[in-house]
Image (cartoon, rainbow, N blue to C red):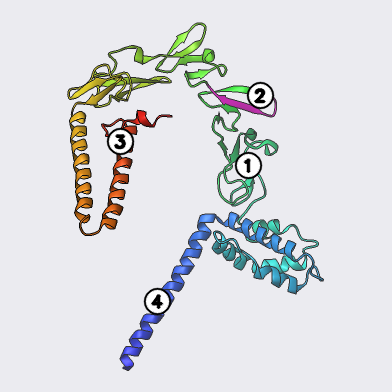
Amino acid sequence: MASFLLGFYAIFLTVLFCDGFGAADEIRQRYEELGPCQACKVFVDSFEKGMQRTIYEPTEHSSHRLAIIQQSLCEEPRSKPACLETATQAKPFIEEWWLHSNKAPDIFQHICIEKLEVCCPKHHYGKQCLPCHGDLENVCSGNGKCRGDGTRKGNGTCLCDPGYSGEFCNECFAGYYKSYEDSDHLLCKRCHYSCMGGCRDGSPRDCVACRPGFLFDTDEGCLDINECNDINICTKDEFCLNSKGSYKCMACDRACKGCYGDSPDMCRKCAKGFSKKGDMCIQDREDEEMDQMTVTRYTTYFGLLVAAGVLLPRSSTLSAAVGALVITYIAGAEYYCAINGHATLLDLSLFSV
């Protein structure tokens, strides 16, 4: 018995420690995913919200107010583990800042930049918080962002927005043109979709060259080539669907032998086993199937009427009730068949108003 209890206790401790280490690993993983600087920003934001909630505390910088703020930190579920990790690291610095907050810098600068050293001032990057490359008043010409801006990461070079290029994002990328430019700002827009190799402006007439699938016209510029004008561009069992700068061959309906669309009423000829009825190519055996279905339907009616007749000697009331139900069923079924164009016992013209 003693050995069993010892074994159980050992298993319990193993599970406990494994779960503990697993939880710690998860917190560390979430902290790393969020990033130290962003985690610190989340913590500072949570602390400032706590200050707003406790603004009516009698003593502005009392330890009681600080305790209330710290108890309600990091309430956002997704960022909670990383935020709490930062709160643990920042605890001694928070108490120091709290006592001298009238003279100290703002909490973000004090905690995230100066003490924990996980962030940098705006438009600075890297371990030494060096200035981003170029003009700090107009970083990356307003058309990109500094790699590592505000963090202890990155290299300070420009990561340009789509459509921009150059060391400081002050040029238009290939396939874009200058829509506006002054001493402080550059606006690049995408060339017309028919252009290849750049353009002077945004219309088809401004293309340096035309993309495949387009043909240059002296008046209109790059115009779409309608490949579907070539009747032999697709196989005999396909039809052509034109698109901007291209085309696609689509399969005809199985009822068709050659077509100009994807439905059985757009056949050039009917395929084997199908016949033309009006505008549609209909499968030949459908009439036979309909005749067979009609015979089956009438046989069912006959069987129901016979069943009602069998009940008559036993109970005229029951037979009458079943007969009424059978007649109602037959009338409803025939009406449904009639309005759907099938052979029927009913003449709908008798019911027209």
Q: Quadrant of the N terminus?
A: bottom left
Asked if residue 50 shows in the view, the reply is yes
Q: Residue at x 18, y 35 (%)?
A: 292
Label located before the other in sequence (1 or 3): 1
Q: Amino acid at mark 3?
A: Cys
Disc 3 packing (10 Å; few <14; some 14–19; many ≥20): some
Direction from residue 134 to residue 97 in the image, left or right:
right
Residue at figure coordinates x 66%, y 24% from the top left:
181
Q: CA distance from mark 2 to mark 4?
A: 65 Å
Question: Horizontal and vertical percent for residue 269?
Answer: 24, 17
> Residue 102 at what x, y percent from top left?
80, 62
What is the distance, in whole Å, between disc 1 and disc 2 at their CAs?
23 Å
Q: Position of residue 236 (x, y in %)?
A: 24, 18
Please indicate, yes or no, whether residue 117 appears anywhere in the rendered image.
Answer: no
Residue with the mark numbered 3 = 337
Q: Quadrant of the C terminus?
A: top left
**Residue 189 within the segment the image draws in magenta:** yes
Q: Nearer the viewer, mark 4 or mark 1?
A: 4
Q: Which mark is residue 181?
A: 2
From which residue to which does the magenta span run?
181-191
Which residue sits at x=21%, y=30%? 286
Q: From the viewer's perspective, is residue 268 above or below residue 301? A: above
Coordinates of residue 26 in the picture (x, y in percent): 47, 64
Which residue lies under the disc numbered 1? 132
* Mark 1, other Cα within 10 Å: few <14 / some 14–19 / many ≥20: many
* Badge 1 element: loop
Residue type at mark 4 is: Val
Circle 2 packing at 10 Å, graded few (<14), some (14-19), many (20+), is: few
Q: Spot the residue most to the top.
A: 218
Element under disc 4: helix
Dot 2 falls on a residue whose secondary structure is strand
Q: CA distance from mark 3 to mark 4?
A: 70 Å
